[in-house]
Image (cartoon, grey):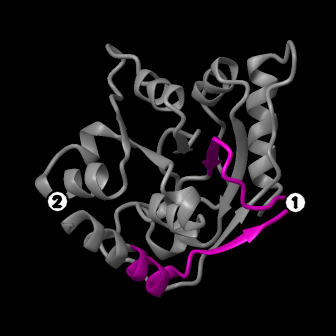
Amino acid sequence: MLASVVRISLIGLVKLLVGAHPRWVAAIPDAAQSIYFTNHTSHLDTLALWVALPAKIRAKARPVAAKDYWGKGIIKRFIALKVLNAVLIEREMTRDPLAPMLAALAVGDSLIIFPEGTRRAQAEPSDFKGGIYQLAETFPQVKLIPVYLDTLHRSMPKGSILPVPMICTVRFGGAIALQANEHKKAFLVRAREAVLSLM
């Protein structure tokens, strides 16, 4: 009950502060299992993309978040696990960070991921890390949906405590797929370009 109330409140707050208006470019909302991958500039990124998804799709879309940040503290952990149903991953090299994501995909969930691996101050995404390639290789049937989050790098940049109200558009592009015999580096460049094309 509490999680449901907080969820509704968060959706309303995000819409009030940044809008998170969805724009489906060369795509339409699809309930098929998907990996939504996007640029990462703000703590609001996860919420903005999650809120922009239609309710039926949102219910199965699980944001991927760092356990060392979202797993600490009662409030952050509650929001991550009970409200957003996030997949928490270990960033330590001693553990496989992909294991929880692979487990979520195996049971039919969709994911929201940030292939850069960490937040950046600029509007353009940095080079993508290899995790998205491994997910696409292991689950070729899952759609890969590029997304671009506009203006959030100015609304709540790294180090900010409170967001500056600013309209954010969440642009969804057409699905891409790992091609037969495509090398990892070529795929990562192509995936990043799919996000850049939505700027």
Instruction: Please say whether residue 15 is one of the residues in the magenta stretch.
Output: yes
| Horizontal side of residue 181 vs 161, given as left or right | right
Position above or below: 70 against 9: above
The answer to whether any part of residue 49 appears in the image is: no
The residue at which mark 2 appears reads as 75
The residue at which mark 1 appears reads as 26
Q: Identify the image quadrant of the C terminus.
A: bottom right
Residue plotted at (69% across, 33% down): 142
- Of marks 1 and 2, which one's residue comes earlier in the chain? 1
The residue carrying pointer 2 sits among few (fewer than 14), some (14 to 19) or many (20 or more) residues within 10 Å by Cα, namely: few
| Horizontal side of residue 46 vs 199, given as left or right | left
The image quadrant that residue 187 belongs to is top right
The image quadrant that residue 32 belongs to is top right
* Percent coordinates x, y for residue 18 in the rendering: 51, 80
Q: CA distance from mark 1 to mark 2?
A: 38 Å
Residue type at the position of mark 1: Ala
Q: Identify the image quadrant of the N terminus.
A: bottom left
User: Circles 1 and 2: CB distance less than 8 Å?
Assistant: no
